[in-house]
Each structure stands twice: as structure tokens, then as C-alpha cells.
Amino acid sequence: MKLRVLGCSGGIGGNLRTTSFLLDHDVLVDAGTGVSELSLAELKMIDHVFVTHSHLDHIACIPMMIDSVWNMRERPITLYAIAETLELLKQHIFNWKIWPNFTEIPDVNHPSLRYQVIGLGETVMLNGRGVTAVPANHVVPAVGYHLDSGLASLVFTGDTTTSDDLWKVVNKIENLRYLIIESAFPDREMELAVVSKHLCPSLLAVELGKLKRDAEIYVSHLSPGEMDLTMLEIEKSARGNRPQMLLNNQEFDF
């Protein structure tokens, strides 16, 4: 399996893109503004989209992607998320008011989009690739994803604050190779991090202290204008784990 980082920032501006990852050639994990980096030919090949939660920076490009390729495809794109997230997308995005309902285009018998609930702890197998929803703790219902090739695994936490349930799951993954976890704010904005259920460097250090597996750790969702400060604080507070900043176009083979 190969995971390519299309976007990993907490915002936009310049070369910053919000959260999205391309798994091999046909699967997206979240679909923020990073999806706009893909060519039309690449967009046409996307068959599956796994969404961590309903916030705009993680779903922004789903409507436009489907609108761009629906008439070039012979089967619908499958959108996977927990039930609460799918319901929010149905109510607030694909509702004919914000965006067309592509479960009815070109008609209900031949939709361009289909919804598939994935329950917490449930694994979807796609040609030998396992995608499992793992716990997250955010201001809206949310999950992370465990991607397993059989040889090695990568866990993407999505947006989360402190979560003992997450580490109970992660610490059972014997073939864990990579962990992508967020830190949205520097410590001077800890109050905001707590209220919005994100992490900041000191909170991240506590969370990483719960990790019992040996894995390479990468930090995503850094706020524009505060990335260097946040990473400096992370380096000081989480020294033993040696987290690195996640970068656009970075690739992980596992």
C-alpha cells in the first residue's frame, strides 16, 4: 500500500492544503482541499472515500470531485463514514440546496454517489487492504482510520483530543509502522484546543506517552502561521517520540 499526502494543514494559503490522503490510486482518506492537487484522470479513478468527520476542511472537495467525474464513471463513488457523519452530509451538503444530491444523479437507480456506514471497530476490505475505523474524540462524532496492508499498518487519528480508547486500539496493532496524529494549536492556545477538542504540544506529549508501539510519528493539522512554533514546542515536550512535521506530497509505503 502507498499513502500519498495531498493535504495536511489546518488551513489554506500558498501551498497549504487541508486534510486529504490518496491510498494507492483509488481510495481517499478525507477529502479536504488537497484533493484539488489531483488531475481529472486521477479523480476519475477514485472509487472509495473514507471520511473521519463532517468538518469542512475534511470534506470540502467531495462535492466538486463527484460533480467533475460522475459522467465519466460507470459506477458510483462509495462514501464511508460513521452513521452520524453520513447523516450530516445528507442534511447539510448533498441536499439540493448547498449541492446536488448525487445519490439521485443521473437517477436513483444509477446513482453517482452511495453512502456506506462503517461502524467503530469495523474493517472494510478492499482487494486485500484493510481499513478500520478507530476511536477519536472531537466536537462532532469522529473516527480515525487504521490502514493495514497485512505487512504493516498506518494509523491516522483524524481530529482528536485526548482519548484513552484510541490508544487501547493502537497498542494492539502489532505491525504498526506509522502514526499520523494532529496538533492544531501551539500551547499558548491550549484553552482553544481544549474547547475545540484538538491537541496542542503539551497535550500531544501526554497522548504519545500512552503509545506502547514503536512507530514513526508525524504531526498534521498545524495552523497556518504557527507551524514552526508548534513544532518547536512539540520537539521540546515530546522528545522521546521524535515526532516529525507531515508534509504535502510525502509518501508512505507499507
Image (cartoon, rainbow, N blue to C red):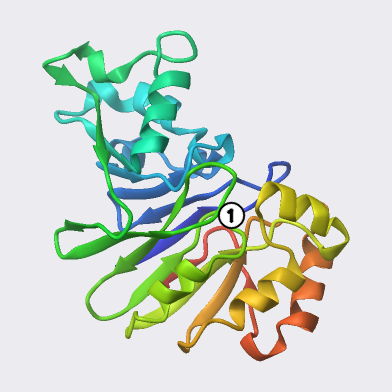
Q: Vertical placement of 18 versus 211: above or below?
A: above
**Near-viewer residue (206 or 49):** 206
Can you see residue 186?
yes
| In this rendering, position of residue 73 left or right of residue 144 | left
Q: Which residue is drawn at 60% across and 79% down?
A: 208
Q: Vertical placement of 221 versus 65: above or below?
A: below
Q: Vertical placement of 15 versus 164: above or below?
A: above
| In this rendering, position of residue 217 left or right of residue 99 | right
Question: Which element carries disc 1, helix, strand or loop?
Answer: loop
Farthest residue toward the top?
97
**Near-viewer residue (21 or 188):** 188
Where residue 159 sits in the image (x, y, percent)? 56, 53
Which amino acid, by three-letter code, is at mark 1? Cys
Report which residue position mark 1 lands on. 8
Kindly indicate the quadrant of the structure image that contains residue 173.
bottom left
Which of the image's four quarters has the N terminus? bottom left
**Near-viewer residue (163 or 53):** 163
Where residue 53 sits in the image (x, y, percent)? 47, 43
